[in-house]
Amino acid sequence: MSFEVRWAQERDAEHLSAFFAKAYGAQSVLTDLGFLRWYLGSSDGFNSVIAVERAGDVVAHYGALRVPFRLADATVELWWGVNAFTLPSHRGRGLGQEVVAPIMERAELFGVIGFSPQTANFYEREGFNLFSRRRFSRYARVLREETFGLAPLYAESSDRVRARLPLRPWSTEEELPRDGRLMRGTTDVPGVIATTLRRQDYLQHRFSHAPAPRYQMFTSSSGDAFVCFRVARLFPTGLSSLNVVDASGSVEAVRELLRRVLSAAAHLRCAYVDFVAWGGPYGDVMRDLQFETLEEDEVGLLPLLTSPIAPRDNHEYLGLYSRAHHGAVHRLNSSDVYLTRADSDRDRAARLSDLAAVNA
């Protein structure tokens, strides 16, 4: 059987929804056309390459999230590769490589986050900078004793979690922000040369216009720093966590905003607060605020899956690739780069119930 490999158009929307139902289940948030258009939509269709049968059915997919990015002294467009999937009945025919090739060719800068060690071998052969296969770090502060009782749900030892992450409640409380205002423009991240450009249009699309989850933001009075976060239910328990999704601005401004985040978490009775990041200037701030720094396999000492809580290996590897900026990309060291949960699709909603929860 022959297949057509091409960029997805608006007329493919229903076929994409049906494909994602087969790929991820009928309850996948990617079956919702409104979410799908926000997530992968472009001016003339979708930022996706698909393989389709003659009847129009999609059998393979590779998508991209396009964001403004600073690479050394240049402003470039970074394409994060997401949702690579070939239906099991059509594997072994090379469709996976066929749908990714047009995106890698068109992208000025191409990036991937979260892949297995076996997939890392493929990216290495293709010429990606994998940063010595380092993984994202996680800063964590446990606020409530009940956190330790979660460990068996993700096949971890409560004693091991307690030994590495001591209980450290926060004494002050603050209600969540009411206005949720965004930054007026690009904010600076000191000391790095490769990071997302947090322009107002990007922030509005990424946080204000996101159908789910619901984001909150503390901003500095001058409007030149922010910390964005969300509260996540820890199913099947009645607990919740506060997850810092992004932070930007001067170190001192971010420090004060993180104090407010901890106060908000205490007010909401959150079990713990965490911030998953790659590099950046805020590590000392997190340690000063008594966050523990978890690296490599220790990242999984707190659950990586929370809806519901389940075991999951830490595969938060990073790969960057560019033909146009090959030298600049391969000169990057880990300390040059700052990325957060906001990058790629690591913080997106997963199920239709996530949409329902926001609209409830």
Image: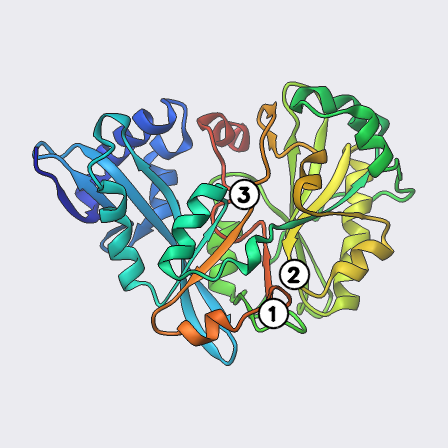
Q: Nearer the viewer, residue 61 or 327?
A: 327
**Label disc, if present, on residue 347 of the rendered structure:** 3
**Label disc, if present, on residue 279 of the rendered structure:** 2
The residue carrying pointer 3 sits among few (fewer than 14), some (14 to 19) or many (20 or more) residues within 10 Å by Cα, namely some
Residue 243 placement (x, y as % from top left): 67, 42
Q: What amino acid is at disc 3?
A: Asp
The answer to whether any part of residue 43 appears in the image is: no
**Marks 1 and 2 close (CB-CB < 8 Å):** yes
Q: Is residue 7 above or below residue 300?
A: below
Q: Quadrant of the N terminus?
A: top left
**Label disc, if present, on residue 32 of the rendered structure:** none
Q: Nearer the viewer, residue 75 or 212?
A: 75
N-terminal of the pair, mark 3 or mark 2, is: 2
Q: What amino acid is at disc 2?
A: Gly
N-terminal of the pair, mark 1 or mark 3, is: 1
Is 219 on the left-hand or right-hand side of 4? right
At horizontal 66% and vertical 24% (from top left) the residue drawn is: 154
The residue carrying pointer 2 sits among few (fewer than 14), some (14 to 19) or many (20 or more) residues within 10 Å by Cα, namely many
Q: What amino acid is at disc 1?
A: Asp
Residue 192 placement (x, y as % from top left): 62, 71
Is 271 on the left-hand or right-hand side of 310? right
Mark 1 residue element: helix
